[in-house]
Amino acid sequence: MQHDNVLSLKGLYIGENEDGLETMRLLGINEHVEGLIDADSLMRSDQDLSMFMRLQMASACVEGLKALHTKGIVHGDLHLGRLFVRACPPPPALLSLHR
C-alpha cells in the first residue's frame, strides 16, 4: 500500500517470544526511512511539542488509519511504539504495519 502516512511492509520474520517460551511470534519488516523516531521515544524526550504540532501528528495518524481501513486492513495492537514521526519539524506521523 502506498500512502504518505503509512510505512510499507517489506517482509515477515518469525522470531522467538521475549518471555523465553518456545512459542514463536511473527514480526513485520518495514521500509527504512531516515530520520524517523517512534512516538513513544518522542513523548519521553524533553522536546517541547506545541499543541499545533500534536494536532498535526494526530491528524496524520488518522489519515494513515483511514487509508488502511479503506483497503480493508485493520492494524492490531496500535500504540505509540508503532507510530513514527520525523525527527525534525514538521513531524507528520507514519504508521507501522507490523504486529
Image: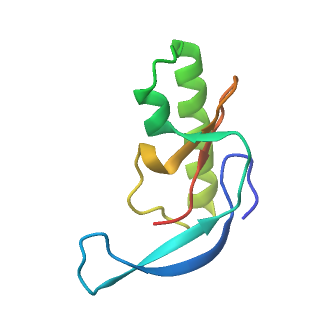
Residue 66 at x, y percent in the picture: 58, 50
- In the displayed image of the protein, which residue is found farthest to the bottom? 22
Q: Is residue 31 above or below residue 24?
A: above
Residue 95 at x, y percent in the picture: 58, 50
What's the residue at 60%, 59% (across, down)? 68
Q: Is residue 26 above or below residue 43?
A: below
Q: How many marks?
A: 0
What's the residue at 29%, 85% (across, down)? 23
* 39 and 35: which is toward the camera: 35
- In the displayed image of the protein, which residue is found farthest to the front? 20
Quadrant of residue 34 within the rendered picture: top right
Q: Is residue 53 left or right of residue 89?
A: left
Residue 44 at x, y percent in the picture: 40, 28
Q: Can residue 48 be seen here?
A: yes
Q: Is residue 17 left or right of residue 97?
A: left
- Quick one: quadrant of the C terminus? bottom left
Q: Is residue 22 left or right of residue 25?
A: left
Q: Can residue 72 be seen here?
A: no
* 31 and 57: which is toward the camera: 31
Quadrant of residue 77 within the rendered picture: bottom left
Q: Is residue 31 above or below residue 52?
A: below
* 75 and 13: which is toward the camera: 13
Residue 14 at x, y percent in the picture: 47, 83
What's the residue at 56%, 59% (across, down)? 69
Q: Is residue 94 left or right of residue 76?
A: right
